[in-house]
Image (cartoon, rainbow, N blue to C red):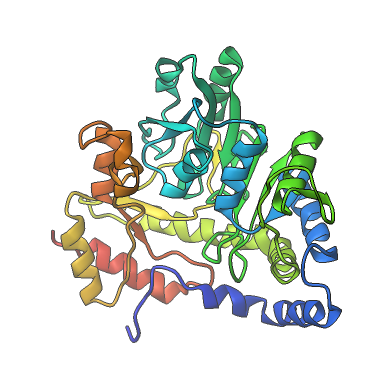
């Protein structure tokens, strides 16, 4: 077919609601109020209600949400935080920026934290578990919560890829002390630049987060702590309010696309993703696995089909964390996933013709 099929298309989702988004942008620009104003307050209220949380605090990015979450929980030097080994490196940065030590755990068959291994990793230094709901699917929250309760651990959720995903009808981000969200443009609920937020039921934590995000100030020029400049701006908040209103239909479209992949992909060289019983995935990515990944990527590229690897280097093998002393073979399943996963094109506004072309190409892949 004419034109390349990219792994993601951000323009398609914009054009779906172009008039509403452009009207909101003009409304904000003409208001003369661009930081921490009524749009941020409105989004915080609406996103808290959407997730089922009592409080939402808008921030500048998902990474800020993570490191500030551990900051307000008082977790730092000398403390350990358990996190899955196959996550994006930002999850780990949220821990180490505060001086805490990440303790890695292998993933399960659904690409999320293997809850059955947590008990053996808890030490006297363990203060929290960081759950990452990867690729749009919830982790095994029932068993993870039990471990946290038995050992008195804090629980932080990285929901950068799970906006609207549920575990037993409860939305991700609402199980732990703090749920952290990114609204980077490629996310299921994406802004038009960097943006993030946390949700929590604890008013004390929400109040502390509001202070930390604004230079440590509750009242202008009166600084209680050494904080950060991490304020969700009015323009992004306003645009996110439009997209949040349409998130259920955007999610349903992604589910239809994923369902079609699962039903029509027949090539035995491809291992298709599965959904954990009791979970509802929002399909941030449709991730297959194959031992012939490089050959498959080149094959698809020749036909004008783009793909992405999420993620080729697990954090424990990253140069950035060489100081932790890990080597290849320490987390073999996470490493196997890094060597075999491949994300297929999936985006809001993807046409039936485009997906048919991808499916036909994959089914014809000879290996």
Q: Position of residue 343 (x, y in %)?
A: 36, 58
Residue depicted at 79% across the width and 76% down the height: 28
Judge by depth and name the residue closer to the eye, 54 or 135: 54
Judge by depth and name the residue closer to the eye, 292 or 36: 36
Judge by depth and name the residue closer to the eye, 198 or 14: 198
* Image position of 35 with respect to 335: above or below: below
Q: Is residue 145 left or right of residue 122?
A: right
Is residue 267 visible in the rendered structure shown here? yes
Q: Is residue 252 left or right of residue 343?
A: right
Q: Is residue 343 left or right of residue 32?
A: left
Q: Position of residue 164 (x, y in %)?
A: 63, 49
Q: Position of residue 365 (x, y in %)?
A: 19, 63
Residue depicted at 41% across the width and 19% down the height: 121
* Image position of 366 with respect to 177: above or below: below
Which quadrant holds the C terminus?
Answer: bottom left
Report which quarter residue 51 is drawn in.
Answer: top right
Q: Position of residue 104 (x, y in %)?
A: 38, 31
Report which quarter residue 154 is drawn in.
Answer: top right
Residue depicted at 14% across the width and 61% down the height: 366
Looking at the image, the residue that sits furthest to the bottom is: 2
């Amino acid at each position: 077919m004419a034109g390349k099929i990219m792994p993601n298309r951000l323009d398609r989702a914009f054009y779906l609601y172009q008039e509403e988004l452009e009207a909101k942008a003009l409304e904000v620009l003409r208001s003369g109020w661009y930081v921490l104003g009524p749009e941020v307050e409105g989004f915080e209220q609406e996103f808290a209600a959407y997730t089922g949380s009592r409080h939402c605090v808008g921030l500048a990015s998902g990474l800020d949400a993570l490191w500030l979450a551990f900051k307000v929980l008082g977790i730092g030097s000398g403390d350990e935080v358990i996190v899955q080994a196959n996550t994006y490196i930002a999850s780990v940065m949220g821990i180490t920026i505060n001086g805490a030590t990440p303790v890695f755990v292998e993933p399960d068959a659904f690409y999320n934290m293997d809850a059955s291994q947590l008990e053996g990793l808890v030490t006297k230094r363990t203060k929290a578990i960081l759950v990452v709901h990867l690729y749009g699917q919830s982790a095994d929250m029932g068993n993870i919560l039990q471990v946290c309760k038995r050992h008195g651990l804090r629980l932080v959720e990285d929901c950068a890829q799970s906006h609207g995903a549920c575990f037993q009808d409860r939305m991700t981000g609402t199980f732990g002390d703090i749920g952290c969200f990114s609204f980077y443009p490629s996310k299921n609920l994406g802004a038009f630049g960097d943006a993030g937020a946390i949700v929590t039921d604890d008013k004390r934590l929400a109040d502390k987060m509001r202070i930390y995000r604004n230079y440590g100030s509750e009242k202008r020029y009166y600084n209680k702590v050494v904080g950060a400049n991490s304020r969700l701006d009015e323009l992004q908040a306003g645009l996110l309010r439009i997209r949040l209103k349409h998130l259920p239909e955007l999610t349903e479209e992604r589910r239809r696309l994923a369902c079609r992949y699962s039903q029509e992909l027949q090539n035995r060289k491809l291992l298709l993703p599965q959904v954990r019983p009791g979970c509802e995935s929002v399909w941030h990515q449709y991730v297959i696995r194959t031992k012939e990944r490089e050959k498959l990527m080149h094959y698809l590229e020749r036909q004008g089909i783009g793909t992405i690897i999420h993620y080729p280097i697990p954090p424990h093998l990253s140069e950035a964390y060489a100081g932790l002393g890990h080597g290849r073979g320490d987390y073999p399943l996470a490493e196997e996933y890094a060597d075999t996963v491949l994300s297929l094109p999936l985006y809001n506004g993807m046409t039936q013709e485009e997906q048919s072309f991808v499916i036909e190409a994959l089914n014809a892949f000879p290996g």
